[in-house]
């Protein structure tokens, strides 16, 4: 991380369908704040400029086996600046509720497909979390789709796991400024 970015806040931004991704992004932001980092927590659709952030954490619900369109748009539109700062991406989806290697492989494949569509998109960390399906948060057609697709609803989020993962990111986000070599 460059020295000029050291005092800037971290942006934790998210794209959510039913609110689960927002709630996990809130957990990430809280861990960062408790460590002393300044954090801005914002929906991805409200972010217009990332130049004033030292690092960006993007959470996105998985939407038809891809990052949500607004998350994809954010990455595409900000690709040049994202290449100059640490970028972390996490996905949230009901598929991860199974906790199986096959579910993780599927989530990894879907996120990589989204990221690979943008040249030079290289996050320093990518993670995948189970979400929650709360039908009351969804419109009629989404409720029907969820019932037909998953056949179940519930809350499979691992808050402690999200917090531990967030804590593990801290060394990469608060690394000391590069030392000037005098020789």
Image: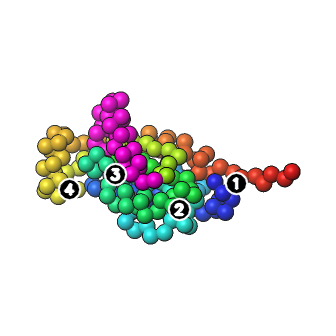
**Res 164 visible:** yes
Mostly what secondary structure, the magenta segment?
helix
Can you tell which quarter of the image residue 158 is in? top left
Which mark is first along the chain, 1 or 4? Answer: 4
Which corner quadrant holds the N terminus? bottom right
Q: Distance between the residues labelled 4 and 3?
A: 18 Å
Q: How far apart are marks 1 and 2 (CA)?
A: 19 Å
Q: Label 3, secondary structure: give it.
A: loop
Of 177 and 170, nearer the camera is 177
Q: Is residue 23 left or right of residue 120?
A: left
Q: Which residue is drawn at 27% across and 55% down?
A: 18
Q: Which residue is drawn at 55% across and 53% down?
A: 86
In the rendering, at what x and y percent does residue 167 appear? 54, 44
Q: Which mark is residue 138?
A: 4
Q: In this view, does 142 lie to the left or right of 10?
A: left
Which mark is first along the chain, 3 or 4? Answer: 3
Magenta part of the protein: which range? 93-119
The outermost residue toward the right is 183
């Amino acid at each position: 991380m460059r020295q000029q970015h050291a005092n800037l806040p971290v942006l934790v931004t998210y794209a959510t369908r039913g609110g689960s991704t927002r709630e996990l992004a809130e957990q990430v932001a809280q861990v960062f704040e408790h460590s002393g980092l300044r954090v801005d927590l914002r929906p991805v659709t409200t972010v217009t400029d990332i130049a004033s952030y030292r690092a960006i954490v993007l959470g996105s619900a998985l939407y038809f086996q891809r990052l949500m369109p607004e998350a994809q748009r954010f990455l595409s539109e900000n690709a040049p600046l994202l290449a100059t700062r640490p970028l972390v991406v996490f996905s949230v989806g009901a598929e991860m509720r199974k906790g199986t290697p096959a579910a993780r492989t599927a989530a990894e494949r879907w996120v990589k497909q989204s990221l690979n569509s943008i040249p030079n998109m290289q996050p320093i960390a990518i993670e995948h979390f189970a979400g929650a399906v709360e039908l009351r948060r969804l419109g009629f057609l989404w409720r029907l789709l969820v019932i037909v697709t998953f056949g179940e609803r519930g809350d499979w989020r691992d808050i402690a796991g999200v917090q531990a993962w967030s804590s593990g990111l801290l060394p990469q986000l608060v690394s000391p400024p590069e030392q000037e070599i005098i020789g």
